[in-house]
Image (cartoon, helix red, strand yellow):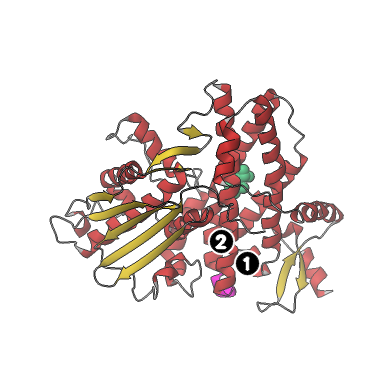
């Protein structure tokens, strides 16, 4: 009775929600669960049907092999794979959200994401089979629009989960966030790969040796590191928004010196690698500048690249003083979205920054390449006047880099040499044979 009356007062996004009691779980009393009306009962049966199917996971190598010998028939097959696979992956995450404590689902940000996912799920599941190239064009436009609409997902989720962190055990919060973010990366990879394959087939310029869809088959690590470093050194406000005033503006930013196996090339998604390198260098540059605020010349950041039979590794070493502080007890706490492990999650400045980004029409740029790539296409040293920070400082660079690194089976580790600097180790599998790291 109590539950029924509470359910009838639910607002967005819990139009699909009915309060229910789950005595076996440790968190607060009321939980959101489907469904309050006959319509939603039907819709929820659809959700159950999709959520009960396993995702068909891919390896990087499969994406390359399938995309390499593209023709119209294979492209239509790819379109229908995206059409049927994405609603399954979204359905898993909607079920995950429905299992959250009610107080979490109704938080600003989480509510918005739930609505976006429900709408996308419903549109995908109703989308008719694609049989011609013309229908594929319309499908690509449909998917592109969804990709744009979903740009605000990460800041919204981060905001909602930060606000919810007093109500969720930190392990549960981080596991949930990880599933959400990995799954989002996976959906965007499939969608963007298909759109890129379509463009190359239509241009008659089928996948080249270098690029297959969104995968660069000979991605040069040194170039990528230097590109991100040049960009950051010329855009100090992207490293720190206060950098144009005050003592931080005294010295130029650190140089980045690349050594080791500098000719290493491997097949990878350029945007993912750039995101990781960009965020790590941004942190190192800022920390070095803060630590040596009165120095005229800053110590360099050393990037060492090493290729073995199975992996490529990058070690970034800075002299920015290390990571452990009164707020951060262990470097791995920087990967956490919970205020218990990372008190800065509830800092007003961070919440306000998240609010601004999550409601801006631009949302977050999906990739560094969108920015760094445009700039690169222009000239090597000319950053367009309208360029914007690909990833504003909202406190998710490290957790997201960790998720990008682990997505195809790699790793990211931080070692703090307290008082001196930080070493970051990124390992990425070279053979592309690991399945995507999504969980059901
Ligand atoms: C996302 O960006 O969160 C997505 O799920 C994108 C997908 C709907 C194409």
Gap between marks 1 and 2 measured at Cα: 16 Å
Residue 306 percent coordinates (x, y):
34, 52
Q: Which residue has dot 2 on it? A: 178
Name which of mark 1 and mark 2 comes first in the sequence. Answer: 1
| Residue 94 vertical position relative to residue 330 in the rendered view, above or below | above
- Magenta residues: mostly which secondary structure? helix
**Residue 104 image label:** 1
Q: Nearer the viewer, residue 247 or 371?
A: 371
In magenta stretch: residue 356: no
Say which residue appears at 66% left-offset and 79% top-offset: 26
> Can the viewer see residue 149?
no
Residue 151 percent coordinates (x, y):
54, 46
| Residue 171 vertical position relative to residue 360 in the rendered view, above or below | below
Say which residue appears at 56% left-offset and 58% top-offset: 157
Q: Residue furthest right?
A: 38
> Can the viewer see residue 261?
yes
Residue 300 percent coordinates (x, y):
21, 55
- Identify the element where label 2 is drawn: helix
Q: Where does the magenta region start and end?
A: 164-169
Which of the 4 image quarters holds residue 223? top left
């Amino acid at each position: 009775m109590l539950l029924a009356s509470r359910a009838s007062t639910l607002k967005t996004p819990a139009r699909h929600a009915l309060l229910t009691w789950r005595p076996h779980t440790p968190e607060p009393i009321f939980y959101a669960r489907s469904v309050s009306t006959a319509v939603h009962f039907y819709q929820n049966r659809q959700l159950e049907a999709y959520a009960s199917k396993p995702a068909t996971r891919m390896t990087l190598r499969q994406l390359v092999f399938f995309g390499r010998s593209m023709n119209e028939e294979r492209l239509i097959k790819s379109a229908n794979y995206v059409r049927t696979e994405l609603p399954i992956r979204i359905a898993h995450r909607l079920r995950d959200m429905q299992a959250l404590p009610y107080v979490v689902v109704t938080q600003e940000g989480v509510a918005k994401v739930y609505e976006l996912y429900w709408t996308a799920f419903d549109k995908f599941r109703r989308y008719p089979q694609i049989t011609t190239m013309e229908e594929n064009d319309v499908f690509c436009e449909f998917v592109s629009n969804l990709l744009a609409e979903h740009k605000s997902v990460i800041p919204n989720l981060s905001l909602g989960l930060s606000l919810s962190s007093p109500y969720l055990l930190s392990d549960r919060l981080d596991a949930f966030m990880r599933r959400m973010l990995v799954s989002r990366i996976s959906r965007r990879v499939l969608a963007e790969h298909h759109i890129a394959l379509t463009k190359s087939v239509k241009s008659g310029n089928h996948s080249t040796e270098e690029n297959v869809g969104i995968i660069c088959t000979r991605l040069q690590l040194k170039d990528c590191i230097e590109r991100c470093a040049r960009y950051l050194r010329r855009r100090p406000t992207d490293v720190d928004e206060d950098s144009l005033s005050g003592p931080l503006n005294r010295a130029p930013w650190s140089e980045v010196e690349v050594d080791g196996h500098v000719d290493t090339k491997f097949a990878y998604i350029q945007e993912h690698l750039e995101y990781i390198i960009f965020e790590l260098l941004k942190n190192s540059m800022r920390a070095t500048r803060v630590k040596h605020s009165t120095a005229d010349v800053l110590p360099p950041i050393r990037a060492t690249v090493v290729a073995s039979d199975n992996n490529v590794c990058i070690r970034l070493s800075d002299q920015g003083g290390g990571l452990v502080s009164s707020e951060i007890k262990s470097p791995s706490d920087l990967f956490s979205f919970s205020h218990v492990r990372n008190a800065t999650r509830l800092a007003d400045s961070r919440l306000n920054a998240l609010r601004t980004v999550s409601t801006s029409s631009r949302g977050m740029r999906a990739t560094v390449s969108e920015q760094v790539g445009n700039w690169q296409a222009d000239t090597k040293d000319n950053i367009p006047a309208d360029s914007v920070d690909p990833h504003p400082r909202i406190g998710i660079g490290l957790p997201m880099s960790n998720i990008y690194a682990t997505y195809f089976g790699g790793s990211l580790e931080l070692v703090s040499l307290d008082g001196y600097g930080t070493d970051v180790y990124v390992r990425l599998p070279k053979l592309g044979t690991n399945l995507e790291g999504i969980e059901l």
